[in-house]
Amino acid sequence: MKIILDAGHGYETPGKRSPDGFREYEFNRQAAHHCRKLLEQAGLTVMDSHSDEWDIPLSERTGMANRWKADCYVSIHANAYGTGWNSANGIETYVHTSRPAEAVKLAQSVQAQLVKETGLADRGVKTADFHVLRKTTMTAILIECGFMTNKTECRLLQSKEYQQLCGETIGMALLSFYKPAGGLYKVQTGAFSQLKNAQSLAGKLRENGVPAYITYS
């Protein structure tokens, strides 16, 4: 299975910053990085449509995905409402206005997992005519992981822990939805209903030189 991960925008994209200057792309790229690691550990083939060097135009991103014949396109973002601090908050996931059946189901799964793991408000699955949803020929969703214009959520978006939490939660939702074939022999050291608890144990194992990764079933 082939997945395109799209960290929205770029470091220097005009306007894509919090009121205090935090760049949206910094969150997007880190969340995509953690998502990619999880998917590749599970045996999926992953390609990034973004670059740290420049903001790749949307037409190039979708063209790349279409030429590669990806099975799924996942665009990761942080949200904003206006340009100043305000109370808008929560997580939302978008599909195209034509509401493709598989995209809707995938968006619902990702949305539910993110809301559960982050504890942020559920803004639901919505529709929009975004380029990355309109011009891709595969299942495509766009995820907004919290508001840069909300002081509390902006602090989360800047934290390495939240970036990892969002990336791995998106990855686990994709694995749960697509259930890729194949497998590995695994040694389990714990099972948790909350991702943050699994991350805590995995971190302790890594600190002691034991390779560890998280799966969701």
Image (cartoon, rainbow, N blue to C red):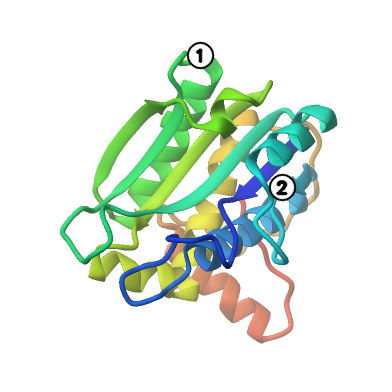
Element under disc 1: helix
Please give the name of the residue rendered at 61% of the width and 51% of the height, measured from the top-left corner. 215
Quadrant in the picture for the C terminus = top right
Q: Is residue 30 left or right of residue 183?
A: left
Q: In this rendering, does residue 42 appear at all?
A: no
Quadrant in the picture for the N terminus = top right
Q: Tell me the kind of residue under disc 2.
A: Ser
Label 2: which residue?
Answer: 49
Residue 35 image position (x, y, % from top left): 62, 54
Please give the name of the residue rendered at 76% of the width and 53% of the height, measured from the top-left corner. 41
Q: Is residue 86 above or below residue 139?
A: below
Q: Is residue 131 above or below residue 215?
A: above
- How crowded pointer 2 is (Cα within 10 Å; few <14, some 14-19, many 20+) is rated as many
Return the disc, 2 or 1, that comes first in the chain's sequence: 2
Q: Is residue 27 left or right of residue 67?
A: left
Which circle, 2 or 1, is nearer the viewer? 2
Label 1: which residue?
Answer: 101
Residue 205 image position (x, y, % from top left): 63, 77
